[in-house]
Image (cartoon, rainbow, N blue to C red):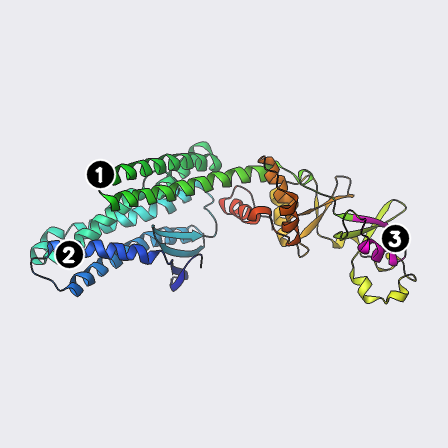
Amino acid sequence: MKEGWELMRLKGIPLRVHPSWFVILFLFTWTSQGQVVRVSQTQLAPWTSWGLGLITALLLFLSVLLHELGHSFVAINEGIKVKSITLFLLGGVARVEKECATPMAALRVAAAGPIVSFLLAIALLTPVSSVSNWSPLFGNLLGQIGSLNLVLGLFNLLPGLPLDGGLILKALVWKWTGSQRKGIQVATNTGRFLAIFAIVLGLWVSLQGRGIGGLWLIMLGWFGLSASRSQSQMLVLQEILCELTVSDARSRRFRVLEEDQPLRRLSELRLSKNSEDSSPEWILLCRSGRWVGYLTDNVLKDIPVQNWDKYTLGDHQSPLTDLPSVGEKIPLWQAVNYLEKSDEGRLLVFSSAGLPCGTLDRVDLGQAVLKKLGIDLPGKLLSAARAHNTYPLGMSLNKIVEAMFSSGSIEKPD
């Protein structure tokens, strides 16, 4: 369960709770319960203090939810579909279908969450003094939730991805430089610095004997460092997919036969033990050096064995235009997009002269990207990936291309 359980829908937006959320819910309930006991002027029953602690924790996450709804509603107003809101161990996250098309729209969406948190903090902290005179417990509840909203707003304004402040910084750099990629790079680098600082500070706090606070800082820093590393890797892979072309990745996984050969020749080719590839993916046909079509193995199933010498390969050919294809000069990101739309799971590559010059599948794409990174995989790993028609090492290049579409760095074809 990657995104958790769906609890409800708010304005069509699925609200999900990740299993890790229950861990932080318990921790906040526990700490809030202790605060209730200290503030209470009378002896409270355990169920009362724990109940008030649970209410405090739930109100905190209601604040987190309102923070994410702030992002979501502004995103919807900017024409961006919100896929879901998920509460998890470190707070909440809203998943959107794509990024904003302009830096100012991205700025508005990023700033909406902290603004909601600050408004809640003002609304809750303003009456604390007068309410505390009437009910210390209620005043403590307002003070805790108001203070936590203030901290939530300020923390999210730290200028590093994946925090809102990092998104604001990315939007500002994008506006100043005209480059969204430059904005991502700057915000990613500042996010990495803040993450390392949080880890170091967490270790220092832990050594001072404040274990919970130090552990929390270390967790936040580790999460930020992982997000920064993932973002950096994503940028590198996106650059490679834009830099390399199909000609850098293509292989030659087809056989060429003359169309006037008997149908039995196809069977012999498939059964050949001395063939370099005993199961070529495509059989392409030619006539006097000219490409005329292709043939599938289905014909061997449809025609009795005793008639294989009566028919030629050309009698059952299909035009090459029926095969999913791609030009050798197009960038790899575009080839990934074509490949994912193909039922065949592979593409026939055409040269600039319009002639078949190779094939392209997920293994070819992944291998080209890995080689650009200086990584050579063993043949067994590549064979296993090709047997299942998957990207090597689970690279999911299709998701990287989708991220490029979402960010607007490339335009999605119709």
Kind of residue at disc 2: Val
**CA distance for labels 2 and 1:** 25 Å
Q: Earlier in the sequence, mark 2 or mark 1?
A: 2
Please tell me how crowded label 2 is: few (under 14), some (14-19), or many (20+) other residues with Cα within 10 Å: many
Which residue occupies 13% across, 52% down?
128
Q: Residue at x 27, y 49 (%)?
A: 117
Foreground residue, 239 or 41? 41
The picture places residue 267, in percent across and down from the top left corner, at 83, 58
Q: Nearer the viewer, mark 3 or mark 1?
A: 1
The spot of residue 173 in percent (x, y) is 42, 34
Residue under pointer 3: 259
The residue lying toward the viewer, choosing from 131 and 260, is: 260
**What kind of residue is marked 1?**
Gln
- Residue 195 place in picture, x, y as percent: 36, 38
Instruction: Tell me, yes or no, whether the highlighted magenta stretch contains residue 8.
Output: no
Distance from disc 3 to disc 1, alpha carbons, whole Å, reads 81 Å
Q: CA distance from mark 3 to mark 2?
A: 86 Å
Q: Depth-wise, is mark 2 or mark 1 nearer the camera?
A: 1
Q: Which mark is residue 208?
A: 1
Precedes in sequence: disc 3 or disc 2: 2
- Earlier in the chain: of badge 3 and badge 1, it is 1
* Res 396 visible: no
Magenta range: 255-274
Above or below 342: residue 400: above
* Camera-side mark, 3 or 2: 2
Per the image, the residue denoted by label 2 is 36
Q: Residue farthest to the top?
A: 177
Q: Nearer the viewer, residue 127 or 333?
A: 333
- Would you say 365 lies left or right of 222 here? right
Q: Amino acid at mark 3?
A: Glu
Q: Report if residue 241 is visible in the image.
A: yes
Secondary element at tag 1 = loop
